[in-house]
Image: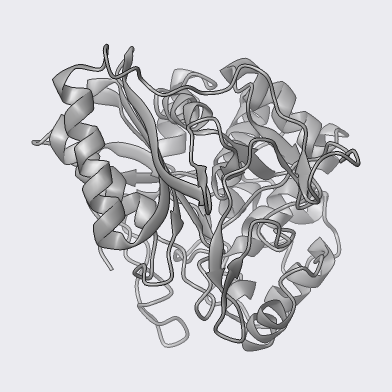
Amino acid sequence: MRYRPVASLCVAALAAAVLQVPAAVPAGAVPSVADGCTATPASSGGATAREIAGIVQRAKAELDLRAVQFRAADGREVVTGAVGESRSGEPATPAMHFRAGSVGIVYLGIVLLQLAEEGRVRLDDPVSRWLPDLPDGDRITLKMLGTSTSGLHDYVTDPVFVKELSADPNRRWTPEELVGISTRHPLWYPPGTDWSYSHANFVLLGAALEKITGTRLDRLLQERVMGPAGLRQTRNGYTPAIPQPVLHAFTEDSEGLYVDSTYWNPSWTTAPGAVLTMDVCDLARSARAVGAGELLSPASYRLQLEPGTVGLGHATVNCPASVCLRQTRDAHFGVGVIVLDGWVMTNPSFFGYAAVQAYLPDERLAIAVSTTTGPRAPQGNTAETVAQRISAALVPDRPLTPFPR
């Protein structure tokens, strides 16, 4: 379920780090995090690892990718690696940190379900209980935010927002500005009656979780998700900074120039405190923690995957089929996650970065891919294409498939 591009800019919820930058570190970067991710040694990888490395190399050339980081694990490491360059003359490595986008909204959904398990909230509680100034907040529930069934417009499709973002990608956006753009539009449909993706849902959910717990969102996600899942390379912050080593991204700017977009401001992508950076080993670990339900009770895990969205997503007089996308048993949105032919996944993309974390519970298989793009790369999430090809090699009878458009 790919989130729509803003003009030529790929979008999804994204990342940054909160550490302070010392003078010796390049602007926008922060010191390195210890115990980084390493590539599978050539002497120990075996035939499967070599096959996947070949698939990645061919995809890099075919799709005009600057770099690809990849990892597959099925309870043990199958292969970890990286090909291409971060910047000219600087080889990409698996330890390089990248923006991890909509992985953050997955974590918001997990925290919401944890709080419901603990009896601190009910999923059907109206958002107005914590966010009284939200228009229609008495009709929109916490669950509707987590499942993207609120009816709120997606601000990234607003023409004025697109123009302003393209003109100044370094601008810092506030949650109030972003939600205000969405609420200037009428609801697509009565809350809870249809499905349409909106970044505003997760900006609001982050704000509500802070009010419910009295804990700043970055700390809340660290305490309840990243810490318990063992994500040591994942950072969650409020600035465009990224921990060293950094995988640089490049994309086309508003003047049509191919430029370094690594430190463009991700503040518009999701709730402050839920913007993430990580390495590809953490992305694979995250895929397993989420896809296997490690952070939830069995009942909450089932609800995460099947929250009642199947059957929603149908065009109406007010909502075109391109917005209200059909949700089926084989391809639907859960609570912050995508369920696709049995895989549990998410697929962030943003300003030259793209990634996929995917987990197939039946096979205990995690696939993680991060890509950066060259000037002739195709539109859309190129990491998803690479992940699909890796999955076809590892589980040919259950490959990861594109979401129906």
Could you tell me which residue is drawn at 77 percent across and 32 percent down? 31
Q: Nearer the viewer, residue 188 or 239?
A: 239
Q: Quadrant of the C terminus?
A: bottom left
Task: Choose top left, top right, bottom left or bottom right for residue 259.
Answer: bottom right
User: Could you tell whether 218 is left or right of 165 in the image?
Assistant: right
Could you tell me which residue is drawn at 38 percent across and 57 percent down? 65
Could you tell me which residue is drawn at 25 percent across and 52 percent down? 59
Task: Choose top left, top right, bottom left or bottom right for residue 2.
Answer: bottom left
From what the image shows, is residue 264 above or below residue 385? Answer: below
Q: Nearer the viewer, residue 370 or 32?
A: 32
From what the image shows, is residue 185 above or below residue 81? Answer: below
The x and y percentages for residue 337 are 46, 44
Q: Nearer the viewer, residue 224 or 357?
A: 357
The x and y percentages for residue 38 are 47, 22
Could you tell me which residue is drawn at 48 percent across and 41 percent down? 91
The x and y percentages for residue 255 are 61, 87
Q: Is residue 90 visible?
A: yes
Q: Nearer the viewer, residue 51 or 71?
A: 51
User: Could you tell whether 21 is left or right of 39 in the image?
Assistant: right
User: Could you tell whether 365 is left or right of 246 in the image?
Assistant: left
The x and y percentages for residue 131 are 82, 55
From what the image shows, is residue 11 above or below residue 262? Answer: below
User: Could you tell whether 210 is left or right of 125 in the image?
Assistant: right
Task: Choose top left, top right, bottom left or bottom right for residue 266.
Answer: bottom right
